[in-house]
Image: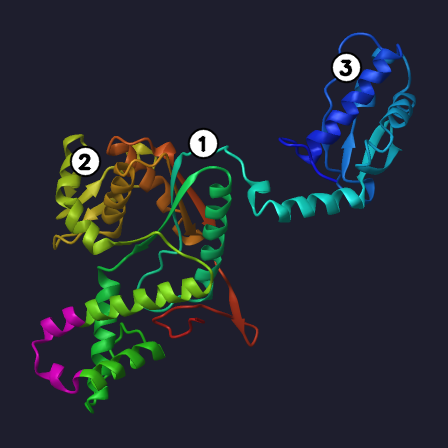
Amino acid sequence: MQLPADHTLRSLLCFHVCEALRALQGDGLFAGPPPEVVLTPPKQPRFGDWSCAVALSLSKAAGLPPRQVAAQLQARLGDAGGWLSKVEIAGPGYLNLFVASAAWHGILRQIVASAGKFVRCQTGAGQRVLLEYVSANPTGPLHVAHGRGAVLGDALARLLSACGYRVEREYYLNDMGRQIDVLAGSLWVRYQQACGREVALPEDFYPGAYITEMATALHAEVGDVWLQRPLQEVHAALAERGVAQMRTRIADDLRAYGVEFDHYVSERALTARMDLPQILARLARHGHVYSQQGKQWFASTALGDDKDRVVMREDGRPTYFASDIAYHDDKMKRGYDRLINVWGADHGGYVPRVRAGLQALGHDPAKLQLILIQMVSLSRGGEALKMGKRLGTAVW
């Protein structure tokens, strides 16, 4: 069996119920327009695939108890042209519709034969959507918790594409800031050890085996030469090398997982391109930034946040939030109709402040939709295990 063009199974069955109503109207059962036919899924599968309460709506006009109206509808409906295996009357006069197995089989064959076109529509009408997900720091490989965001984001991208949206997938690389300094410092310690030096482990350190592997590979490539280079130069080179290698590994892991991205956006490159001081000046001109205690603050409470946020530290370094404002300003300027971010539940507090930043820059904050996913919890020996690169407990 094959569904007619532009019909779902529900709409097809509604059509058959409406035809049965028109037949009863022709028999003189009731006068006036037929009531609306609505099919709803029953709460329990044993009551069929759809339930219809139209007999209860028609009872008064027909001058009959609902169950008698339902019995006449049942007789007129029959098997709905082979689409139904049976129709039962339940309760005060509900019609429970059971779809025939042959009908389901026919629809499945139709889906397979359509090569994916069966489940496509044009609801999105070509609207451009930028979907950002995963976006884990490039300081280590992806761990199992990142897999949840990867699955949700990729599935959402595929669904939106099937519904006629033009979707672009984006991964935001936080490749600047304190965590990158820690990555470089961790590589420096392991590189020195590979050169035979005795080095004490710093308090802020990534102990994962992947750090040792990267440092050992570097030593095999250049030997002890880097011990003679200025420390600042070495740290900068290690940071660049570490981020590049982690980005490659992240992309390879995602590809093996069936997840591809259209863009990898570097926070460092974005900050240089967007001219963050100029963005903060834009905010200040409209009274959204003020100075206090040597810092610059974004007055986000005036825009719905629970407290004001620091955007520039005392030493002139921007905060993560300042970079987030610049990033979302850049997204808006690229002309998308909708922005969707998939974030972990621990980022829930960022939602009102990012929207406030967009509003302060003159963008429509309603264009940004945030989807929060719960964190992945693991246990070992019955004890909760906190996953962390610095704890060395991440499960890749």
Does 235 appear in magenta? yes
Residue in the picture at 34% in, 71% down:
390
Residue 96, x across and y down, in percent: 82, 34
Q: Which residue is mark 3?
A: 34
Residue type of the residue flagged with mark 2: Leu
Relative to 344, is 217 above or below?
A: below
Q: Which residue is mark 1?
A: 125
Residue 270, x across and y down, in percent: 21, 50
Label 1 vs 2, first from the N-terminus: 1
Residue type of the residue flagged with mark 1: Ala
- Disc 1, SS: loop
Closest to the observer, 378 or 297: 378
Res. 308 in view: no
What is the distance, in whole Å, between disc 3 and disc 1 at their CAs?
A: 34 Å
Q: Which residue is mark 2?
A: 283
Residue 248, x across and y down, in percent: 31, 66
Q: Are marks 2 and 3 in contact (CB under 8 Å)?
A: no
Q: Are marks 1 and 2 in contact (CB under 8 Å)?
A: no
Closest to the observer, 384 or 47: 47
Residues in magenta? 222-237
Question: Taking 206 as reference, is 225 left or right?
Answer: left
Residue type of the residue flagged with mark 3: Pro
Q: Are marks 3 and 1 in contact (CB under 8 Å)?
A: no
Residue in the picture at 79% in, 21% down:
19
Closest to the observer, 163 or 2: 2
Closest to the observer, 163 or 349: 163
